[in-house]
Amino acid sequence: MTGRKSSEDAPIPNRIAELREKAKLSRVELAERVGVNSQTIGYLERGEYNPSLALAFRFSELFGLPVEKIFVRKQKKRGSSA
Amino acid sequence: MVEQWVPFAVVSFIVLLSFLTNVAFGSKVADWTNSAPVEINSPWKRPRLLAGKSLVALWFVTALLYIATLPGAIVVDGVVLQISSLPALLLLAGLTVAVITYKRSLAQQPNGALDERERGIRDTLYLTSYRIAVSIIAGVFLAGFMAKFIAELEVNLDQIPTDTALGIAITAAMFLWVLPSLVHAWTDPIPDEVSDEVRDGWKTAKREIKREIAEIRKDLPKSEKVALAELRKADRKLGRTRTKKKTGKRS
């Protein structure tokens, strides 16, 4: 079910894969810890799914980092002209 | 009399068999009573002989075949047609079970057995199914209205034999029941029977190799930098001494 994506639904880049590797966790282990299916971890790591706020906070608690350090909102590049 | 019970017995057997193989035999089963998220992945993978769109197409072909072989639909010989519709019914029942169990029965799972992403997919499936069902019902009414009032055709539902009407009703009920799963099978783009880790194994390996190379490189420039810095220092010292010597000589 891949619907048409609006600009608001655009994937939010995240560091889940990097943090998972640092924590030496498999996708299945990470999925068990945050209470989702392991395939959802795959979707998250590939940036094909944006998690809910509750799930984002579960990642935050697990990795011991603030949410904004895990999920990075890309900032639009502004032109140099003032 | 016994013949009438055969289809029901076979359908019941297929449904029971499907339940046992997909739920009871899995190492991690869906807990239907527990509201907590439960992993429903089982290491045992159902062979994907029929996947996605082909499964949906086959279901519709079989449904049409069943309706076509219902007694009264083709008026040749009542007894022969009644027997000939049985394999179609059995095949339809089997395909219905196959569609229902598509991707771990995601479309039929309760909230507790799904995570938030899967719940989102399932809810979208039901919304799409509702729209399709409403469109079909509206289309049937519109066609009936046009046949009666515009084309002025005689539409007499009483002429349809009871067995045929019952068969159509069974197919329609089966269709409505299986519709979310049909939508799922039709629209699902990624076959996730293979786990992400297996599928992305080469990617993970590549990433790990890259990381190791980066670490090695990180170490290398350091030593190079240190060596260069020392050389520069030495050069500077040498330069200073040279200039001192030169200036000393001049002075």
Image (cartoon, coloured by chain):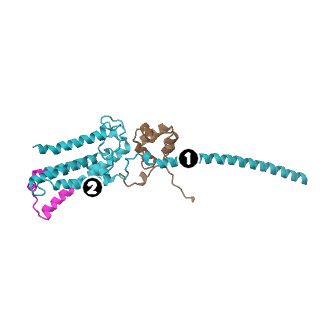
**Of all residues shown, which one is farthest toward the bottom?**
B151
Of labels 1 and 2, earlier in sequence is 2
Q: Is residue B205 left or right of residue B195?
A: right
Residue B86 on image: x %, y %: 16, 50
Mark 1 residue type? Arg
| Residue B203 drawn in magenta | no
Dot label at residue B57 = 2
**Of all residues shown, which one is farthest toward the top?**
B34
Using the image, name the chain to which the residue with label 1 belongs: B
User: Residue at horizontal 59%, vertical 45%?
Assistant: B215
Q: Is residue B246 visible?
A: yes
User: Residue at horizontal 40%, vertical 38%?
Assistant: A35
Dominant secondary structure of the residues highlighted in magenta in the image = helix
Q: Nearer the viewer, residue B172 or A64?
A: B172
Q: Which chain is brown?
A: A
Tags 1 and 2 both on a single chain: yes
Q: Is residue A68 visible?
A: no
According to the image, label 1 marks what residue?
Answer: B211
Q: Is residue A7 left or right of residue B83?
A: right
Mark 2 residue type? Ala
Residue B216 on image: x %, y %: 61, 46
Magenta residues, start to end: B138-165
| Residue B151 drawn in magenta | yes
Instruction: State the hue of chain B.
Output: cyan
Using the image, name the chain to which the residue with label 2 belongs: B
